[in-house]
Image (cartoon, rainbow, N blue to C red):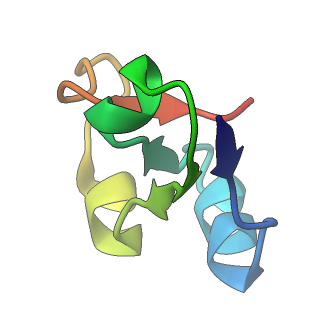
Amino acid sequence: MTIKIQPPNIFDKIVAIFGKKRAVYIPEKAMGGKYGIYEARRENILLALLRPENKPLPKGWQYTE
């Protein structure tokens, strides 16, 4: 199983300036599958900026760092 995560881009740097992190969504079928290539989806920049720091992430979302 391979999960591709996009490299950081300009939007990740903008979010980091405000002291926040951007989460990625990893499909559930990637967690249980034996074979396959899956691509993680990045969180919307506005959701990352507006989310309170201590609010837990929804199911399936994780921080990469």
Could you tell me residue 13's position as x and y percent?
75, 68
Quick one: quadrant of the C terminus?
top right
Q: Is residue 43 left or right of residue 39?
A: left
Which residue is at the far front?
A: 35
In the depicted structure, whether residue 25 falls above or below residue 50? above
Can you give x and y, in whole percent of width and height, for residue 28 in the image? 29, 31
Number of marks present in the image shown? 0
Q: Quadrant of residue 41?
A: bottom left
Residue at 34% x, 69% y is 44
The x, y position of residue 63, in whole percent, is 56, 31
Residue 49 or residue 65, whichever sits in front: 65
Q: Is residue 44 above or below residue 30?
A: below
**Outermost residue toward the right?**
7
Image quadrant of residue 49?
Answer: bottom left
Single out the residue that lies furthest toward the bottom.
10
The residue under the point 81% across, 66% down is 7
Residue appearing at x 56%, y 47% in the figure: 36
The image quadrant where one finds the N terminus is: top right
1 with respect to 52 (left or right): right
**Left or right: residue 44 compared with residue 20:** left
Question: Which residue is depicted at the point 48% across and 47% down?
Answer: 24
Above or below residue 34? Residue 19 is: below
Taking depth in this image into account, of 25 and 29 the one nearest to the observer is 29
Which of the pair 34/43 is nearer the observer?
34
Residue 50 position within the rendered picture, expressed as x and y whole percent measured from the top left? 26, 55
